[in-house]
Amino acid sequence: MFVRLRHKLTVLYAGLFCAALILIGGTAYVVIADATQRLARDQLVKASEIFERSVRLRTEHLAASADSAANIVSLQQAAAGRDESAIRTQLEALRDNANADLTFLVTREGLVIAEDANAPTSVPPGLQRALAQTEAPSGILVFDGRQYHAATARIPGGLGWLVVGGRLDGDVQALEELATIPLDASTPLHTSEGWAQGEDAAALGALIERQVRAQSLRAEAIETSSGRTLALATPLPALDGSPSVLLLRYQLDGGLTQYSALFGTLLTVGLVGLSLLIAGSWLLANDITRPLSTLESAAQKLQEGVFETVAIVGRDELARLAASFNAMTGALRERERKITHLAYHDAETRLPNRLALERRLASAPQPERVYLAAIGVDRFTEVRGAIGYTLAGALMRVLGQRLLQLVPNAPVARLSSDVLGVGLLADSEADARKRASALIGALEQPLALEGHNLDINVTIGLAQPRAKTESPGAMIERASVALDQARSARQKLGLFDEAAYGDPARNLSLMSEMRRAVESGELMIVHQPKYDFRTGRIGSAECLVRWRHPTRGMIAPDLFIPMAEETGHIRALTEWVLRRAIVDQKRLAAAGWPLTLAVNVSGRLIGDDEFARAALELVAKAPHQLCFEITETAVIDNPQKALENIELFASKGVRISIDDYGSGLSSLAYLKQLPAHELKIDKLFVQSITNSQRDALLVRSTIELAHGLGLDVVAEGVETPGTFALLASMKCDLTQGYLIARPATIEELIAILGDEKRMRFYQQTALGGVAPAAARLA
């Protein structure tokens, strides 16, 4: 939220101060509000007690006055003689003496004699019941909608009763004026509509009912239309049976208005303090962040590689931080120098490395004339094994120094453990070859290492000047490839041959596309039949993989299968071929041709136990026998494991065929150990047996040798009737080639198997009738 530290510090301090002010103000408000409420509760209770005491005293005073008047003889005589004038005179004197608002006499007959018009003309029913039940009842008397303190006195001789009353509303008003808090007092009556009327009737009525039942002096807070109100209801004694209460109310919200000045003062003090705090925090933060900003600027320059020291001011923590930063900058400067040297130099020979050579090539002033020579020390591994790693490193260092002397100011580097690189200025390829040849002669001069003379041989691979779009690293790669090409050709000097190298990136991309090709149907299986001389029929076929790429067309198996072996995709490909072979074998069986299908298994998979288990699980699902064609060199890497798996395949009913016999390093020892069922003679020997007596002799002897070992013989590459007939005469068991049939789809294979005309041609050709049969086949 805040980018600058000074803003963050200022806001933080101001926020903490505001939080403290809010906490103090809130606490003060809560404490004052609570104290005000407790004070109001106490005042309401005290006001209620005072009112109750006032009512009691007033009633007692009225009762005493009424009792004194009842004992006056003249009043008794007037009452006995029904002298209303005299009675009114006595009543007027009683009112003045008792300070009453209402006086009247109730005769024993129930008639009312009053001294003024305010008195009732008849005895209220409630008063009449009270006079009949009590000797001298007193309490609240309700008459003409008004409430009075009322007291009575019986006139001796049963002549009647004196009733004296004082207005109650005057006492209520006096209570409001005498109270120390602004309260609202009233004396509601219980009517048919309840205790109260208006919008607060429900809340007030419920409160009065609760407190009348509880008979306890405890104020309660309720919500009214004017806000939160503290209320207390106290029942009043009734003379005539009409229930009434003293209701005291106090507005809690209004009770805090007297503290408005205090709250205003707190707010003003808080705002002034906040302003001072913000100003002080800003100044303090500015003092803290100024040196930090200086350090930040120096750190940014350090990130850009500019080592800048920071001025140290003072002796506080920031000054010590600046001193530490300066020390760190110095250490980083020295460390960067060492790292840069290590990054661009070989640690063993202290010669420039490949990265340094790339920089020199990238900045060459005449890149169109720069040829790059990769100089490899021949048989370096053997030399290092003889003299040790230390002297081998010294050997490369001496060669590098000699190279620097031969080609001064030229970019020189160690590219790998046994390869040095150097840039040569030349006007043409011939000139570059001439210069490189001269280097070979000079570098192959004997070297003296620790008193010993060493003779070495070198090979040079030359890369042509790089194009503008080519990186120096790619040029170094071309020189390294040229070195490999020269060694493969057994030449001392070789120029990069792009045609021979091809496009590795494009070929490698095929491997990532192979899985997609399997799923999309680009890969397909074709079958090349094998003709059996013994039955005169086609009894088996070899499964071959074909790849029809959507953009590159048909891709030769010789390209993608070796790459699949190198990249590890060969297992997935072989398992897919096995599954397809089983599916096609079922289709052949359904068509009435139960053929044995052969699948080529890479030598890299023979020693793989996981592949062996997966292959046997698939073989168990095949409806007929399957054949695994393997090369005899497949057992060279791990003979024991390979022989174990081959024996396992054979024990599970898999036919084992030794493929391409004669094309590699054929070994009678491996031929003896392998539990094979058939031997396939390579087509290089078979195709020339009709015009080469040597090849014919080799094929015949191989057939006799295989038969002696109990093996069937398959001849590959049969393309002419003459070859076919000659193999038949040599007692060859099976033959395979374009004469029999080219690789065919499953539908085409079924058609070939049912072609009786083709089968008769094979049979007659095997018997020697080549010309007539060929004519009939045409």
Image (cartoon, rainbow, N blue to C red):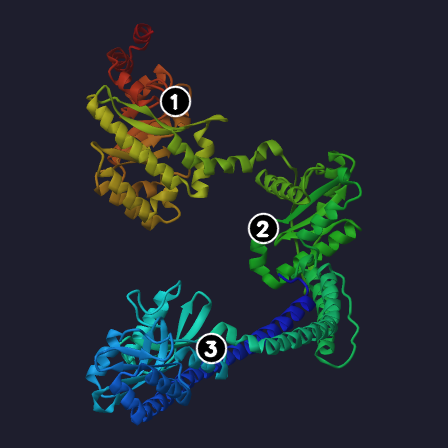
Tell which circle, 3 or 2, labels the residue nearer the N-terminal end. 3
Q: What residue is pinned by disc 1?
A: 689
Q: Residue at x 49, y 84 (%)?
A: 178
Tell which circle, 3 or 1, labels the residue nearer the N-terminal end. 3
Mark 2 falls on what kind of element? Answer: loop
Nearer-the-camera pick, 714 or 568: 568
Nearer-the-camera pick, 439 or 769: 439
Looking at the picture, does residue 144 appear above or below residue 672? below
Question: Could you classify mark 2 by the number of other residues whose Cα lies within 10 Å: few (under 14), some (14-19), or many (20 or more)?
Answer: few
Q: Residue at x 64, y 60 (%)?
A: 393
Nearer-the-camera pick, 147 or 628: 147
Tell which circle, 1 or 2, labels the residue nearer the N-terminal end. 2
User: Which amino acid, mark 2?
Assistant: Arg
- Alpha-carbon span between mark 1 and mark 2: 41 Å
Q: Residue at x 69, y 68 (%)?
A: 6
Q: Are marks 1 and 2 in contact (CB under 8 Å)?
A: no
Residue 94 at what x, y percent from top left?
A: 37, 88
Q: Quadrant of the C terminus?
A: top left
Q: What residue is pinned by disc 2?
A: 379
User: Which amino acid, mark 1?
Assistant: Ile
Q: Nearer the viewer, mark 1 or mark 2?
A: 2
Q: What residue is pinned by disc 3?
A: 183
Q: Residue at x 61, y 49 (%)?
A: 378
Q: Are marks 3 and 2 in contact (CB under 8 Å)?
A: no
Mark 3 falls on what kind of element? Answer: loop
Label placed on residue 200 = none
Looking at the picture, does residue 459 appear above or below residue 275? above
